[in-house]
């Protein structure tokens, strides 16, 4: 079922707001003063929705001030779209209140689950890609879109193991969700690199199978390396380092296929200085500008 009622433009969550096809940053309160004083600020900011579900306080004050100047993307981490049980109605109601308060240009969530039998796990856990999981995720995406009155964006996961008896590849599964629900896609390029490395898949083949026409936001982030059980390096999506060179290269490959797309630098652990975060966004912007020039010349 496609989202009914409110029908924003491509990738937009509200009729009067869209993320610009430029580079943005994940906002951290420690950067508030620097961000407000930046004569050339990033094109948009993104925050985790669950950090703003209280009624007030300093977080809301800062976000309200920034929202007057910059487009906002809300990024959820707690809906548990792939969970076996129903969506938490209290959590969904709080999310709807937040969306009504800030009218974000985009809302996104993960293709993952994090709740079971009333318990919440502090991880984004993988699904088995089969018909039952597809029906459940589509039902939950429909419910979110209906409740919020917007088209949501679904983020591809970073994974470290896979189920033996799935019937869809991950790109096929995501494409089916997009087709059935009308949702958009948040393409996390770091997640593509991390998952393909960990599972020995070809990232170019992965991207070829993805519904890139539905990509309305891109995430770039750093990752860590750990020792895998087979002696090979295991990549961990920890958002705690500069974007890896392999991810920058993959990002340019994506833009060559999609053209300019709103692109966010995520950095959630070992939070850097504002200047370093902006340097990463500036590099992303250079790639977006090059993609725009190539599209204009085509």
Image: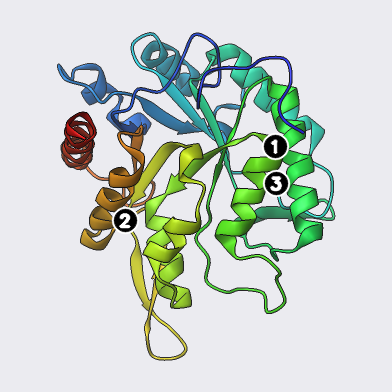
Q: Label 2 vs label 3: CA separation?
A: 25 Å
- Is residue 99 left or right of 290 when viewed as pictured? right
The image shows residue 198, relative to residue 105, as above or below, that is below
Residue 64, picture quadrant: top left
- Is residue 64 left or right of 149 when viewed as pictured? left
Crowding near the residue tagged with mark 1, few <14, some 14–19, many ≥20 C-alpha atoms within 10 Å:
many
Q: Label 2 vs label 1: CA separation?
A: 30 Å
Under circle 1, the secondary element is: helix
Crowding near the residue tagged with mark 2, few <14, some 14–19, many ≥20 C-alpha atoms within 10 Å:
many
Under circle 2, the secondary element is: loop
Evaluate whether residue 55 shows in this view. no
Write down the residue under mark 1: 181
Residues under numbered marks 1 and 3 in contact, where contact means CB atoms less than 8 Å apart: no
**Dot placed on the residue nearer the N-terminal end, 2 or 3:** 3
Q: Where is residue 297 in the image (x, y as percent from the top left)?
A: 17, 32
Residue at 68% across, 54% down: 113
Write down the residue under mark 3: 81
Q: Label 1 vs label 3: CA separation?
A: 13 Å
Residue mark closest to the camera, 1 vs 3: 1
Evaluate whether residue 169 shows in this view. yes
Q: Position of residue 166 (x, y in %)?
A: 70, 71
Residue at 33% across, 55% down: 240
Write down the residue under mark 2: 222
The image shows residue 7, relative to residue 254, as above or below, that is above
Residue at 25% across, 17% down: 36
Q: Nearer the viewer, residue 13 or 68?
A: 13
**Dot placed on the residue nearer the N-terminal end, 2 or 1:** 1
The image shows residue 89, relative to residue 128, as above or below, that is above
């Amino acid at each position: 079922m496609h989202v009914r009622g409110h029908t924003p433009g491509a990738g937009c969550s509200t009729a009067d707001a869209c993320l610009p096809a430029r580079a943005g940053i994940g906002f951290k309160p420690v950067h508030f003063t620097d961000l407000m004083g930046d004569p050339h600020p990033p094109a948009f900011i993104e925050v985790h929705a669950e950090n703003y579900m209280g009624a007030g306080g300093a977080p809301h004050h800062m976000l309200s001030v920034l929202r007057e100047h910059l487009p906002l993307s809300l990024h959820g981490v707690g809906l548990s779209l792939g969970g076996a049980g129903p969506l938490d109605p209290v959590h969904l109601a709080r999310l709807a209140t937040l969306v009504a308060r800030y009218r974000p240009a985009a809302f996104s969530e993960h293709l993952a689950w994090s709740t079971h039998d009333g318990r919440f796990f502090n991880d984004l856990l993988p699904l088995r890609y089969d018909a039952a999981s597809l029906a459940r995720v589509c039902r939950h995406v429909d419910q979110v879109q209906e409740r919020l009155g917007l088209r949501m964006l679904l983020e591809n996961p970073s994974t470290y193991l896979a189920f033996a008896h799935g019937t869809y590849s991950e790109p096929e599964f995501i494409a089916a969700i997009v087709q059935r629900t009308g949702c958009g896609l948040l393409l996390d390029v770091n997640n593509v690199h991390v998952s393909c490395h960990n599972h020995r898949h070809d990232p170019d083949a992965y991207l070829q199978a993805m519904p890139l026409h539905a990509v309305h936001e891109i995430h770039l982030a750093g990752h860590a390396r750990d020792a895998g059980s087979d002696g090979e390096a295991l990549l961990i999506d920890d958002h705690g380092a500069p974007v890896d060179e392999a991810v920058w290269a993959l990002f340019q490959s994506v833009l060559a296929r999609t053209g300019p797309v709103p692109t966010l630098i995520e950095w959630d652990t070992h939070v850097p200085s504002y200047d370093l975060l902006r340097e990463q966004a500036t590099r992303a912007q250079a790639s977006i500008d090059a993609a725009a020039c190539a599209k204009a010349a085509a």
